[in-house]
Image (cartoon, rainbow, N blue to C red):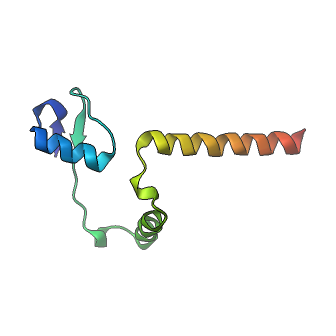
Amino acid sequence: MTFRARELSVDQKMVIEELSGRSLGDDEAISIRAVGSNAAPEWLRQSWESAEALGVDRLCMEEIDGEIDAARRARRSDVQFIAG
């Protein structure tokens, strides 16, 4: 199912913003797909459980991007240190 943010009711938009951890722009499309937990492979279920236990399942996209950028910077500085 795909919805346009501008077509959502105020309550629907509020719920999606709460779940996603960010505001929605009117021009955005929201896709919703329900997947049974048995459909996911065991390694993925374990990853979800680990993320929930660590609290990282609640990160917004900006926080995730920041963590990825920090890891890439750290890796680059490690490589430069070894090569230098």
Residue at figure coordinates x 33%, y 40% from the top left:
22
Image x and y of residue 36, in percent: 25, 67
Numbered marks: total:
0
Image x and y of residue 45, in percent: 40, 69
In the picture provided, is 51 more to the left or to the right than 26? right
Of all residues shown, which one is farthest toward the top? Answer: 27
Residue at figure coordinates x 54%, y 40% from the top left:
66
Taking depth in this image into account, of 17 and 79 the one nearest to the observer is 17
| 68 lies above or below 23 | below
Image x and y of residue 1, in percent: 16, 46
Residue at figure coordinates x 17%, y 40% from the top left:
13
Q: Quadrant of residue 26?
A: top left
Taking depth in this image into account, of 66 and 33 the one nearest to the observer is 66
Q: Quadrant of residue 46?
A: bottom left
| Quadrant containing the C terminus in the rendered view | top right
Taking depth in this image into account, of 40 and 21 the one nearest to the observer is 21
Q: Quadrant of residue 68?
A: top right
Residue at figure coordinates x 79%, y 45% from the top left:
78
In the picture provided, is 4 more to the left or to the right than 45? left
Image x and y of residue 59, in percent: 43, 50
Of all residues shown, which one is farthest toward the right? Answer: 84
